[in-house]
Amino acid sequence: MDTDVDAEIVIVGAGICGLATALALHRKRIKSVVLERSETVRATGAAIIVQANGWRALDELGIGSTLRETAIQIHRGRFISLNEVEPMEFPFGVNKEFRCLKRTDLVKVMADNLPTGTIRTNCQVLSVELDPVTKFPHLMLSNGSVLRAKVVIGCDGVNSAIASMFGLHRTTLRLFSTSVARGFTNYPNGHKFSSEFVMMSKGQVQLGRLPVTDKLVYWFVTRLRTSKDSKIWKDPVLIRQSLMESMKGFPAEAMEMMRNSKLSFLHLTELKYRPPWDLLFNNFRKGTVTIAGDAMHPTGPFVAQGGSASIEDAIVLARCLAQKMFDDKNKTEETTINSAMAEEAFDQYVKERKMRNFWLSFHSFLVGKKLDTTSSIIRFIILAIMSTLFRDPDWHSRYHCGNL
């Protein structure tokens, strides 16, 4: 096989986590290369909910202010049960900074802030192996070439090829009995929705709605997975038809929002997760290879923290590497990375992130499992109890990953 040009630090995957990691390293004057399997950098899904901790992380990356201009602030929440003769409403609070971002906006701003040439597209990584002599990783690419690196950071998502190195194979992923559809509805003349996060529930179907701007609304629908899902997931017309059948009995404005949704942003996905205890019994480092984001801690969307946790991973990882690479007396003087530096940095990164990611995964796991099986009123009660158990309903969003 051919051998490609050597690279110091290789990041696998140009999603939110991979781009955040490259940007965090760039802010610390550390060069990296991002390998993306697709022809272009693209965002999977429609939108991402970002809470206070996510905004603090984005501010550390230097892009928070730009992104705030693309999304309005959500001030409150409202849960509506449609299972009774008359709808029942339960208000709930949201933390002090709660916004819904278009994924394309987030990915574009991250990519635009990276040096030219950082991202290499059409580079699919099949596996990674440690050289028996140098102990540095070799990346096997789908075109038959090998790229030799000193450091590899796997940010290649829930179906990560790099995670297999740690025994986290795709076959060990599990499925919630719930599937989720996500999309946008555009209102050219402006919508009349308040700046609030509304959740509606009827039977086993839940609809969430959040305004992104004064003309764009993000929504998601969760329902029990069906045998038809695997046949329609690539056809947005059939997805919308299936959703509207599931949502019979929902208010007219909800049905109209679904009917007018933008087909190009409509996605239906299974919800994959890894049992949270898998995070406790893995050191997530082999030689100079580690993983981050969904490659490490894939969870359901039930606490809206997957993306923010990935950005936190990126900041902590970059900080740990920088601390080892730069002389303590002169933080601006870059040194060449070696295996000892990388191993110590990754061990510190895993130590800082393991319990944080475990509790986020555990919280999401418990809520997701309960949502699989219980009625809407009991679901709301469970959410309240879970928040009490964790002492603070916004405990996950108050966490600060520290300064970059």
Image (cartoon, grey):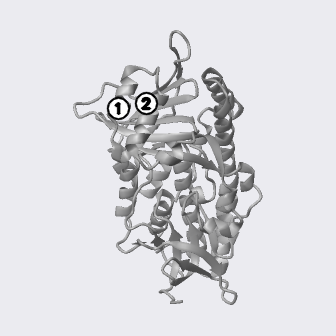
For residue 103, above or below residue 334: above
Residue at numbered disc 2: 244
Which of the two discs, 2 and 1, labels the residue nearer the N terminus?
2
Residue 317, image quadrant: bottom right
Spot occupied by residue 360 in the image (x, y as percentages of width and height) = 64, 45
Q: Would you say the residues marked 2 and 1 are in contact, meaning their CB atoms lie under 8 Å apart?
A: yes
Does residue 135 appear left or right of residue 230 in this picture? right
Crowd class of label 2 (few under 14; some 14 to 19; many from 20; radius 10 Å) = some
Q: Position of residue 18 (x, y in %)?
A: 49, 63
Residue topped by disc 1: 259
Locate the N terminus by quadrant.
bottom right
Marks 2/1: CA distance? Answer: 8 Å
Categorize mark 1 by other alpha carbons within 10 Å: few (<14), some (14-19), many (20+). some
Q: Which mark is residue 112?
A: none
Residue 189 visible? The answer is yes
Q: Position of residue 36 (x, y in %)?
A: 45, 68
Pick the front one: 132 or 109: 132
- Disc 1 marks a residue whose amino acid type is Arg
- Front residue of 248/75: it is 248
Mark 2: secondary structure: helix
What residue lies at 47% left-to-right and 43% top-to-bottom? 50
Query: Which residue type carries mark 2?
Result: Met
Residue at the outermost right position: 281
Q: Position of residue 64 (x, y in %)?
A: 40, 50
Query: Can residue 327 be seen at all in this image of the molecule?
Result: no
Q: Quadrant of residue 129?
A: bottom right
Q: Which type of secondary structure does the marked residue at label 1 adopt?
A: helix
Number of marks in picture: 2
Residue at image location 52% in from the left, 55% down from the top: 311
Which residue does the image show at 45% across and 41% down from the upper left? 182
Viewer-nearest residue: 174 or 299: 174
195 or 349: nearer the eye? 195
